[in-house]
Image: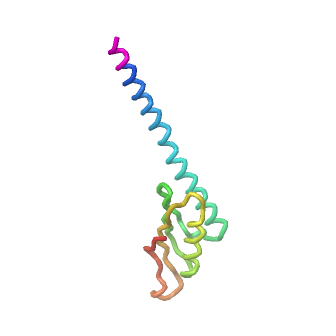
């Protein structure tokens, strides 16, 4: 009799674990999708069409070219202030200026 009780408890624990994993897995992808959508939309609406956001979880990496360091910092600030974004890594390259105005590799 006690074997049935142990089997039932183990089975219930296993099914609970499977349900928990199944519930959490789509949540992470949903969060990533939500952050990616927000970042892409805000960059398009603010005129940063040449910036490509790469989203992993809640971390965002910005890649592409901008006209000035001020624009790179503005893009980073805009993305950093979005709900759901944890950290922004900048891999933006400044074009049209001298080599001393290169931006990239910064973390905010």
Residue drawn at point x = 63 percent, y = 64 percent: 42
Front residue (pair 27, 65): 27
Residue 99 relative to residue 81: left or right: left
- Tell me where residue 53 appears, x and y as whole percent: 52, 63
The vertical placement of 81 against 32, above or below, is: below
Q: Which image quarter: residue 78? A: bottom right
Q: Which image quarter: residue 69? A: bottom right
Magenta stretch: residue 2 in it?
A: yes
- Tell me where residue 98 appears, x and y as whole percent: 48, 88
Q: Residue furthest right?
A: 45
Residue drawn at point x = 49 percent, y = 64 percent: 87
Residue drawn at point x = 55 percent, y = 71 percent: 76
- Tell me where residue 77 appears, x and y as whole percent: 57, 71
- Count how many numbered circles sit on residues in the image: 0
Q: Quadrant of the N terminus?
A: top left
Q: Residue furthest left?
A: 3
Magenta stretch: residue 5 in it?
A: yes
The vertical placement of 60 against 107, above or below, is: above
Residue 104 relative to residue 80: left or right: left
Q: Residue furthest front?
A: 2
Dominant secondary structure of the residues highlighted in magenta in the image: helix
Q: How is the image coloured?
A: rainbow
Q: Which residues are magenta?
A: 1-6
Front residue (pair 93, 30): 30
- Tell me where residue 97 appears, x and y as whole percent: 52, 86
């Amino acid at each position: 009799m006690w074997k049935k009780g142990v089997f039932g408890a183990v089975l219930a624990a296993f099914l609970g674990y499977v349900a928990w994993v199944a519930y959490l897995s789509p949540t992470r992808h949903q969060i990533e999708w939500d952050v990616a959508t927000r970042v892409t939309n805000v960059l398009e609406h603010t005129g940063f069409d040449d910036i490509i956001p790469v989203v992993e979880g809640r971390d965002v990496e910005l890649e592409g070219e901008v006209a000035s360091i001020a624009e790179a910092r503005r893009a980073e600030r805009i993305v950093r202030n979005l709900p759901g974004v944890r950290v922004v890594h900048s891999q933006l390259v400044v074009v049209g200026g001298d080599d001393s105005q290169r931006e990239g590799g910064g973390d905010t």
